[in-house]
Structures are given as structure tokens and as C-alpha cells.
Image (cartoon, helix red, strand yellow):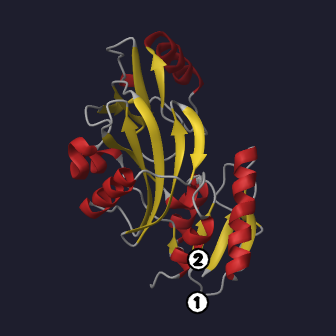
Amino acid sequence: MFWLVQENLFSKINQEELIRTLDALTRIGVRYQLVKIIPFGNTFEPEPDIKPSDLVMVSGSTTMARIAGERGYRPGRFDSGNFSQWKEHYGEHLLNYDSRTCRFADVVPCTETFFIRPHEDTKTFTGFVTTADDFLAWQHMVGLLSDVYATLTPDTLVTVCSVKDIYQEYRFFVIDGRIVTGSTYKRAGELYCSTVIDDDVLEFANQMVQIWQPDRGFVIDIARLSNDELKIVELNNLNSSGFYSCDVMKIVAAIESMEF
């Protein structure tokens, strides 16, 4: 498989993950090319040297995954579905089962604090807990600044719900119905990366994967609540998800083993 890897990702964490990706590709002996995404366009710099017979995998931002889909690369990107699909298939196993979805402009805070996230897995913004006053100020600003280049507009679909008391969070990479690697990544609201995962969490994640899979490859995040309940936080795009302490070699090897 031929991999396109985005290099113009500027945060320290993204740069560290880029190094881990390239190291895994090099060790396994996978052909790859580094590219940059031209802002506000659907072009790569340089244009990829892709052969007609190539299977192409992309690793980078959600924008890169979108372009791969538009260009028809195979497999290119994997789909993580949207919140409505998660809710339909996972039901009360979903952390924010009590949520509602609407346009950003139509959100009316019903409580002093609440959780908000994009309805689609677009990384328009990262889901977070906000107060009613802070949200209304943000909502007003988005309405004033909205233009054709804005990633968040009044029409963007968002999901809002009550705040949950999460103790610990875990991430799992799934390929062809099998969890290939996982990581603890947050504890008590703080970043906490570890390869140690409780057995009941791994068992729960496997059970959820068998209920429904949005695509042949995706990422599933699991939360342990303060009352010890386990819930699905969300599903994420495999092409653009952070690794934390997951084994990147296993991810690359599993993708390379896929048959198309």
C-alpha cells in the first residue's frame, strides 16, 4: 500500500505523532510520501506520485481524509459515522445518549453548564463543557464572523447534552472488527497516557465493536464514569486520530494486512 502522510501539522503532539508514523512505515518497509495541504484548496504539495495500481492510505488531518475521499483513493480514508448512527446502534451504551442535535445557531442552553461537540466527526472544534454565558458569547461571535471560509458557522450541526462525571478514558484502534491496540489517555480530566488497560474495559470495547462497525477501520473511545459504569464516548476517524500510547506499528501492520 502507498501512504500519503501530511507533514504540515504544527502542534508539538502532531509532530511527535508524525515521527512515530514515519518510523513505523520505515520499519515495516511501506512506501510513503510526505505532502502538505494547500490552505483553502483541495490540492497536495507536491502532487502525490501515485501509480494506477496503487492502494492509497492517508494519514493526517480530517481535511486530508476528506480530499482522499473526493479523489476516490482506495482505501484512502475510513468513515467513523455520525452521532445519530452511534445513537441508533449503541443506544444507552453511548455516554451522551440523552443528547439532542441542532444547528449551532439554534442551541438554547437549558442548564448552567453543558457539553457540546460537532455532530459529525469533522474536528470543527473539540467537544468540551461550557457555561451558558460563555456559549452565548461564542454563538454571537460565530454569527458575526461567519463567512465562506469558516469551519464553524451558524448552520453547523452540533450535539449538546448534560455533563457526565468521567473518571478515566481509553482509546482503541479497530481494523476489520478486531481491536489491534489501545491506550489509556485521560484520568480525572487530565492527560494520562498508559498502555495499561483494565480487563473489563477491553471486554466492553470488544462487545461494542461486535454490535456495530461504521467501517473496516475506526477508533472507539471508552469512558469509565465515577460510578464505575462504562460508556462509549465517541467514534473517531482512524486516519486523523491521535495515538496516545497506542502501538503505531500494530496499526500500520494491521492496515497493511487488509485485503481489497
- Residue beneath disc 1: 53
Q: Residue at x 36, y 49 (%)?
A: 82
What is the three-letter code of the residue carrying label 1?
A: Ser
Neighbours of disc 1 within 10 Å: few (<14), some (14-19), many (20+) = few
Residue 186 - label = none
Q: Residue at x 61, y 59 (%)?
A: 64
* Residue 36 versus residue 168 in the image, above or below: below
Q: Is residue 128 visible in this depiction of the protein?
A: yes
Q: Residue at x 52, y 52 (%)?
A: 196
Q: Residue at x 71, y 47 (%)?
A: 13
In the image, taking residue 12 as reference, residue 145 lies left or right, namely: left
Q: Looking at this view, is 199 or 11 the one in front?
A: 199
Describe the element under mark 2 as helix, strand or loop: strand
Q: Looking at this view, is 193 or 42 the one in front?
A: 193
- Residue beneath disc 2: 56
* Residue 39 versus residue 97 in the image, above or below: below
Total count of labels: 2
* Res 115 → quadrant: top left
Question: Residue 243: where, in percent of width, then height?
Answer: 59, 55
Neighbours of disc 2 within 10 Å: few (<14), some (14-19), many (20+) = some
Q: CA distance from mark 2 to mark 1?
A: 9 Å
Question: Residue 202: where, in percent of width, then height?
Answer: 38, 56
What is the three-letter code of the residue carrying label 2?
A: Val
Quadrant, the C terminus: bottom left
Question: Residue 25: where, in percent of width, then height?
Answer: 69, 74
Question: Residue 32: where, in percent of width, then height?
Answer: 71, 76
- Dots 2, 1 in contact, CB < 8 A: no
Describe the element under mark 1 as helix, strand or loop: loop
* Residue 38 versus residue 100 in the image, above or below: below
